[in-house]
Amino acid sequence: MTFFKNNGYQGKFLRINLSTGKVYREFLQDFLVKDYIGGDGFLAYFLYKELKGGIDPLGPDNKIIISTGPLTGTSWPTSGRFVMGAKSPLTGFWGESNSGGFFGAELKFAGWDFLIIEGKAKEPSYIEIFNDEVKIKSAKNLWGKDTRETTLELQKSDPEAQVLCIGIAGENKVRYACVISNLYRAFGRSGMGAVWGSKNLKAIVVRGNKKITVNNPEKFFEISKKAHRRIIEDPRARQMFRYGTNLLVSAKQAIGEFITRNHSEGVFEGADKLSAEYLEENFKGRPRACFGCSNACKEVYTSSSENPWMKNTTVEGPEYEGTAFFGSNIGVDDFDFVLYATDLCNRYGYDQISCGAVISFIIECYEKGIVNSNDVDGLNLKWGEKEPVIQLLHKIARREGIGDLLAEGTKIAAKKIGRGAEKYALHVKGQEISGQDGRTHRSVALTHAVGARGADHLRSLVTVDQLGYKEAAAQRYKKLFEGKTKKEKEKILNELCNPYSENYKAFAVKHTEDIFCIRDSLIVCWYTCGWPPIFWIDDFAEVLPYATGEEKFGSTDELLKIGERIHNIKRLFNLREGLTPADDTLPERFTKEPMPSGPGQGQVANLEIMLDEYYKLRGWDRKTGKIKQETLKRLGLENV
Amino acid sequence: MWRARPWRAYTDGGVSIVNALALINIEEFIPIIRMPNITVRFYTILKEKLGTGSIELSCSNVGDCIRKLSEKFGEKFTQTVLDSKGKVKGYFILLLNGYVVDRKNLRKQKLKNGDVLHIFPPIAGG
């Protein structure tokens, strides 16, 4: 057994047992770095190895892993992100989430590559880490506080300390509760907050002052400087700097994919009042950055003086997803309301996507007569009504009345309601579908269907097959064109970049998934690797050897193999939990209900064609969903 | 199209072409000589530079539309949207009625009355 030398890594991780109160300091082994890199890779390895199949995700046997990567906390741009994983209480399958902010870098400065948190504390607790000193302290005075109150309380003695915490939603184990970082950043998806709540874990505070070394500082800094320059000069990044992700609102509206009234439509009559330009003008949007980032894509808005819930209050966010889920998807075109809902989601600690989706689900059930006023505590749940939505946000976190049912997520809630409610529960594997529509974007149909953590748009969102990015698509998926004539290449490219065609989407999704596993292992931010990317796998292969000294990382083929390995371990995790091909699916809204209006009118997603091709490319058995032996062997997983 | 028997215009002797034309249902000729009326929409930095979020134009194809926008707005448009060769910059997105415009030959993309051309500066998000 050899231990990794410190290059990009601190070479150590913490294992904290909340049941016994014991803290173990362990060393990072060589093979973990070489075969898994960090971040997502470490999550895959440890969660698969250390959890048993069938455990209760809200029981003491579940584990939380919070991990950095070799680039976290360095001068490489967008190096502020970090990942968290556990068995998801929302899906019962693989759970992972990713957040920005400053905590990840601070954890590295404290001298730790990652944390494994086990067991369950006897009483509400929080973990305090200052370099090598680790303490588990009582959080009795914090339990019941929202995330803002908790963070500010824990920063009283040290405003530079970085805090992760849950709100009341996590304490009450709402299945889509999130963990909040830096007041406004979130480990949104997969219900990580509920896992924390089940362990009586309220917060983690970290502070550190150690250095992070890299293998070749001169060359590393040279490349990092160029990387920062690339972001500063990139026109997309400049737009994001100014407008944030709400840039997408107008584009989605134009192509008929702006999710509206529980994904029933793609064109929203109030879109102009949710557009990026309208927000900048009327809500004084300005940018904010995560650690080490030149993109600075986070927008901070100030609510208007007419806002009936919070006048002239500054809130960071929402992202496009939040604007869609608390705007068009519930029939509301009032950004003051969206800001207030976002603030409540942050304070209570909700995944804004799942929470918004649950609310739009119950509104549609009410509109369709499946539930009535008595079923929903007398609330008038109509499209466009705002006050009932506010009431639901309060009720769900506290599990009061109808809130208790909705806290379970759309899958469980729909089953309990019955009477055809399941038709309007838009989830995959139990996790609610995000702000895209597979009818107008075929690759995202596949992305949602096969996501390891359920309906997920971030682990393989292709992007370049929409909006005419042919050059980027040709460069990114060059393997598709190998050995083809010019005419054949043209044909393939046209099909690949046709958002209404199923052709070649499986290749694009699979390839992107593997690369994004690498992205989430380094860890580098999505926004520089998404839309015609600023950074792609070639850039990772260039910088990683200078950071780590590991020559193997200089090969894109080796990196792709590691990415594929990580993704397949997530698949093994899910198979152990009972996943079958029937779970890789979509609600009928996307496969059988034609889009009613807009440019995508009449479209439905033919998922089966894409699934057949995807399984083949993955080397998985189409009937059982299992990974074929030759695939496991190729990836070095045959003895797993 | 012909309201009256055209031969009569010639057998009456000396009937002018103007009179002959009077027999034609002029309104049905209009689509041949009038360009389609379309709406062009601008966003974010382009909207800011041009001072408007949309404009009505008469143009027969997308290439023609870009030319007319260049004439109308001058450098505000050309320096933002076009490269040194006069082509639309690669990171700008052109959507016609919600569909991506084939950028290889903008003149081939014909327009009809009521079309909406969206010109998006680069976008990103997730």
Image (cartoon, coloured by chain):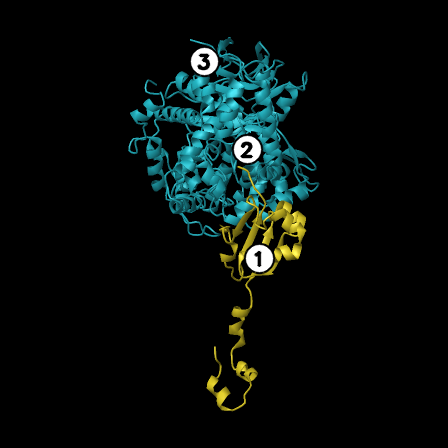
Chain colours: A cyan, B yellow
Q: Is residue A443 above or below residue A63?
A: below
The residue labelled by disc 3 is: A30
Residue A557 location (% of width, % of height): 42, 27
Residue with the most extreme bottom position: B12
Specify few, some or many for label 2: CA neighbours under 10 Å numbering under 14, 14-19, or 20 or more.
many
Q: In this view, does A514 lie above or below A257?
A: above
* Residue A407 in view here: yes
* Residue A164 in view here: no
Is label 3 on the same chain as label 1? no
> Mark 2 or 1, which is nearer the eye?
1
Q: Residue A189 vs residue A225: left or right?
A: left
- Picture quadrant of residue A212: top right
Is label 2 on the same chain as label 3? yes
Badge 3 amino acid: Asp
Q: Which mark is residue A528?
A: 2
Residue A617 location (% of width, % of height): 35, 33
Task: Tell me which chain the residue with mark 3 is part of.
Answer: A
Specify few, some or many for label 1: CA neighbours under 10 Å numbering under 14, 14-19, or 20 or more.
many
Task: Tell me which chain the residue with mark 1 is part of.
Answer: B
Is label 2 on the same chain as label 1? no
